Image: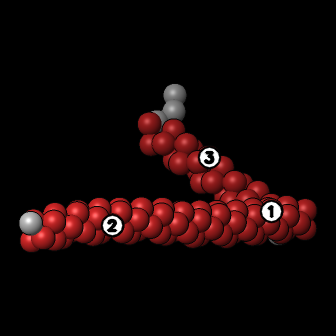
Amino acid sequence: MKSKDADFVERRAAARDAKAALLEKVKAKQNDPAAEARRAERAAIVAAREEREAAKRAEAEKVARENAEREEAEKAAKQAEENKLISRMVEDEAARKAARDERYAARKARKAQR
């Protein structure tokens, strides 16, 4: 019959050996040239992705800037048209007032002749 302490010692030794084996396996994978090649390939993929995303952001900013400029130009054109309409209305009102004043002056002149 085994004692409990012996069982515990064996399990602890087995766990230590298993951890050591895993550590050796990881170290072996890190030093593997194929792993280094895979890491380099992943780094290249990440760099290419970041470059594409930067290009997309730049394009989106360009489009947004062009849209803002176009909207500003449309707004300016609309304001100019609105100002033109207002000035035409003011001119028409001035012409009506001048015609009314002329009629009033003519009526005064007719009354003064009598």
Q: Residues within 10 Å of mark 1 (few under 14, many from 20)?
A: few
Q: Earlier in the sequence, mark 3 or mark 1?
A: 3
Task: Check residue 95 in the rendering and tell me which mark sits there, or answer none.
Answer: 2
Q: Residue at x 53, y 48 (%)?
A: 12
Amino acid type of the residue that numbered disc 1 sits on in the rendered structure: Ile
Q: Earlier in the sequence, mark 2 or mark 3?
A: 3
Tell me, yes or no, if residue 70 can be seen here. yes
Amino acid type of the residue that numbered disc 3 sits on in the rendered structure: Ala
Task: Check residue 22 in the rendering and tell me which mark sits there, or answer none.
Answer: none
Q: Position of residue 114 (x, y in %)?
A: 9, 66
Decide: marks 3, 1 in contact (CB < 8 A)? no
Secondary element under disc 3, as helix, strand or loop, is helix
Tell me, yes or no, if residue 24 can be seen here. no
Amino acid type of the residue that numbered disc 2 sits on in the rendered structure: Ala
Q: Position of residue 1 (x, y in %)?
A: 52, 28
Disc 1 designates what residue?
45
Which of the two residues, 19 or 112, is positioned nearer the viewer here? 112
Q: How many marks?
A: 3
Q: Residue at x 51, y 33 (%)?
A: 2
Secondary element under disc 2, as helix, strand or loop, is helix
Of tags 2 and 3, the one toward the viewer is 2
Disc 3 designates what residue?
14
Question: Above or below — where is 69 with respect to 16?
Answer: below
